[in-house]
Structure formats: structure tokens, C-alpha cells
Image (cartoon, grey):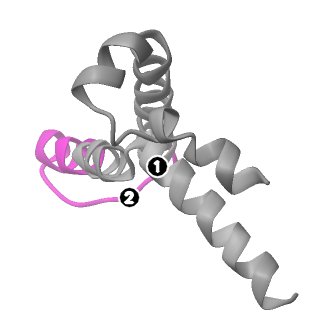
Amino acid sequence: MNIKKFKDSEKILLAYMQLIRLKNCVIVFFAIFITAAMVSGGISISEKIFFAAAAAFIITAAGNIFNDYYDYVIDKINRPDRPFHRARLKEAMR
């Protein structure tokens, strides 16, 4: 893999991380583990808890993408730093 392709892949990954708001998704992911630990009285990572956390991560990411898509006109004025408005995804895909 040459350096240019690596840089392009890095741009695409960064644009997607900004689009889904990765920090919010990670917070939700760990919130599921914390809630499960509080309810069960101890820290135990089971398959069901992991899948619940992964589902919450994906739902949060999808919600953030839908929000950016449907609020495009409003966010274009209020939040011009979002990836949709800067055409970062299109730019990164070239």
C-alpha cells in the first residue's frame, strides 16, 4: 500500500468518525456496561451485555447520521463544521 492510499483511507475514516460522532457512541457503549454492573451488583461481561452495548453503539451512530441528514439546512447555518456541510465524505472518497 502506498502512502497516498494510506492518507486517503485515513481521511475517509476520520470523516466517518466525525459523522457518527464517535465520542457519543463510545459513551453509550460503556454506559450499557456500567448500567449492567450496577443492576447485577458486579462487573461481569457476558455475551448479551456486549451485544446490547454494540446495538446501542450502532443505534446512536445511525441517529447521529439521520440527524445530520434531516437537519441539513438548519445545521448548514448553525454547525458548518459537520462533515456533510464541508463535503468531507465526498472529498475523502475521491
Which one is nearer the viewer's eye here, 9 or 60?
A: 9
Task: Say whether marks 2 and 1 touch (CB < 8 Å).
Answer: yes
Q: Is residue 47 magenta?
A: yes
| Image quarter in which the N terminus is found | bottom right
- Residue at the image point whose x is 12% and y is 50% from the top: 41
Q: Residues within 10 Å of mark 1 (few under 14, many from 20)?
A: some
Q: In terms of secondary structure, what is the magenta stretch mainly?
A: helix
Residue 30 spot, x, y in % from top left: 28, 52
Q: Is residue 36 above or below residue 46?
A: above
Q: Is residue 34 above or below residue 72?
A: below
Q: Say which residue label 2 marks.
A: 45
Name the amino acid type tagged 2. Answer: Ile
Which one is nearer the viewer's eye here, 24 or 6?
A: 6
Q: Is residue 54 magenta?
A: no
Q: Say which residue label 1 marks.
A: 50
Q: Is residue 44 above or below residue 84?
A: below
- In magenta, the rendered stretch is 32-48
Q: Give the tally of numbered discs.
A: 2
Q: Is residue 4 left or right of residue 28?
A: right
